[in-house]
Amino acid sequence: MEKKFFDKIIHGGDYNPDQWINTPEIWDEDMRLMNLAHVNSATISIFSWSLLEPEEGVYNFGWLDEIMDKLHANGKEVILATPSGARPPWLAQKYPEVLRVEENGIRNEFGVRHNHCLTSPVYREKVRNINRMLAERYKNHPALKMWHISNEYCGECHCELCQQAFRDWVKEYYHNDIEELNEKWWNGFWSHRMNDWSQINSPKNRGENHVSAMKLCWNRFVSDSHISFYENEIEPLREITPDIPITTNFMRMYDGIDYQKFAKKMDLVSWDNYPAWDKGRNEEEALAVAFVHDAFRSMKDGQPFFMMESTPSLVNWHDVNKLPKPGMQELSSIQSVAHGADSVQYFQWRKSKGGHEKYHGAVVDHVGHENTRVFRDVARLGEVLEKLSGVVGKESNSKVAVVYDWENSWAVKHFCGFNNINRNYLGECIKWYAPFRKRGISVDVIPMDADFSKYNTVIAPFLYMLKDGTGERIKTYVENGGNFVATYLTGFVDKNDMCYLGGFPGDGLMDVFGVWCEETDSLPEGMKNTASFSGKDYDVVHICDIIHSKGAEILGEYKRDFYAGMPAVTENSFGKGKAYYAAFRNDGDFTDDFCKMLIEKNSIAPDCGITADDGIEIRKRGNHIFIMNFSDSAKKIALDKEYTNVVSGEKISGETVIESCKYIIVTD
Ligand code: GLA
Ligand code: ZN
């Protein structure tokens, strides 16, 4: 879906002029340096509440007026933050209920950030109030282009207010019927039948932590609390500045919030990208990050997203903070754009003089001038980004989707059984995503309730829990000609983590896949079975389903143990489509070989005709093709025709070499 908020790639990042309130000459120097760095935007005021409202009801916006004006005078777009991520000490002191209570039942003291109750009416009101003040003050300011709500919503609160809110949430979820709750949480087990909603508490180690249906409800509740906290925050902004887009910054695949659900409430998705480069596995990390980008892009039906933060050099929160190789951050930024980001933004513009993050990378170092390696790199990238405005708002149409679903990730984490230590849902999804990306095929990463109909092939690894209606949706998709791939432990439970009776996979999927899973085996670390597929043998590790064909064609079999000779891979023709069941986990070539078969059989073409050595990532966005080398050595690429190098403007064709950590961008 093409949607444009800007007509250029936004290049900027978190800027904290509030930390330099006593040295305004630094502000002027910042403007000079931003111009030199080809920075066109600044995200400001993220943690400035104690300066904006130094005492309850006493406001101080003068400094913000000044910096907004300065930024505007220098042609910078402002992304203005709401300050709820960290509150002033007076607020916590006067209203202790705003502070978070940990699982142990103890209320936190004032300190750090992201330390607030999600329910507290006082906090919600105070946040609404300061947001209203900001919106009123800057509604007509020409620099204001986007709202950045709070910062990296995360965590949970176990205070009495949140306990009560959880009880109310559960009550509504189960239609105010305590017997429905007893049924859905299977409370007959261990004598847990409840006769009053007040008997529900949040899950905790010293209390209830074995009812997986309840833990799922807690996850949903916490996630919904963040969403409703956000809705509370944006209420005055929507009212006063209806035309200013709103976002909040997500954190990779953070599992505390259902980002797929949250994204529907946002105008634009944004996320903070901190890959762990240079740990000897850059190609693997690049693939994992690509998956995350694709997940965020898919959250709003292919609409471009913002990469709201990244470090221009190192971070300060790894155990050991190695400097990334020269070129790595630039390549990483380009990868974001290749996958659908309309921005490259940093944390942070200028290193702070004191505080916890003073050694975190920044565009401007403590030395204060532009003659640093990092500054030069940022400025050079800024020039490149200025040549990429042609990709803004553009996205490609993927023919393949991998299902990664937040609710399923919770369910996979909570159940007790089979292999309790080797689950790795995300890792499995990336494993099935890789074969397509390696062949230059664009992939969407979608929840199980997304529209499947636009894809040729949908792969749903480890789809253990099925949300309401999923079985039917898979059935319809395959009936109408889709290819659907499932793996082990598919369709075991419904949304309450209650097993489907009558055979797995449940919810009508036995018919669609033409298989019945009678048992599931788990293999301790180091123990293996073998499965055949298409004339090759593969190791079976960690988990495998022992299945019977009920009409499906058998494409592969187990070779050892008492289930030798039973099906391990099947294909079922159902309606106009095919449903595949890959019943085992393999850490080698199986997924690649299997997906290669799917690609060939369904003529799924790469997005462009450029080919490359392994280790090169190719992604097409609009008419731009990004060719990126994340490997440690130079790699060859072969261009199928003449292209234009977007950065140099030169024509390019035939074979060429891309050095490690380098990229080229071409158009045809
Ligand atoms: C997060 C936060 C920033 C900063 C960076 C440091 O992404 O949003 O405020 O703390 O981490 O990497
Ligand atoms: Zn609370």
Image (cartoon, rainbow, N blue to C red):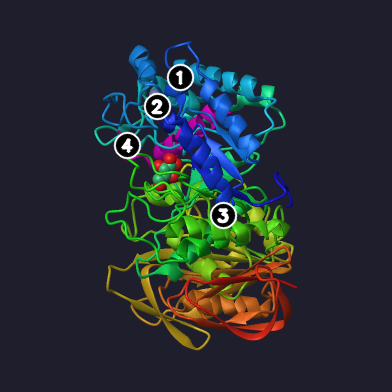
Say which quadrant the C terminus sits in: bottom right
Which residue has dot 2 on it? 116
* Category of crowding for the residue at label 2, using alpha-carbon neighbours closer than 10 angstroms: few (below 14), some (14–19), many (at least 20): many
Query: Gap in Å between the C-alphas at discs 4 and 1?
Result: 25 Å
* Category of crowding for the residue at label 4, using alpha-carbon neighbours closer than 10 angstroms: few (below 14), some (14–19), many (at least 20): few
Q: Which residues make up the magenta segment? A: 208-232
Residue 13 shows in the view: yes
Q: Are discs 1 and 2 less than 8 Å apart at CB?
A: yes
Amino acid at dot 1: Tyr
Q: Quadrant of residue 202?
A: top left
Which residue has dot 4 on it? 355
Q: Nearer the viewer, mark 3 or mark 4?
A: 4
Choose the circle earlier in sequence order: 3 or 2: 2
Query: Can you name the residue that lies furthest to the left here?
Result: 206
Q: Locate residue 550 relative to residue 539 in the image: left or right.
A: right
Choose the circle earlier in sequence order: 4 or 1: 1
Query: Gap in Å between the C-alphas at discs 2 and 4?
Result: 21 Å
Q: Locate residue 67 relative to residue 625 in the image: left or right.
A: left
Which residue has dot 1 on it? 123
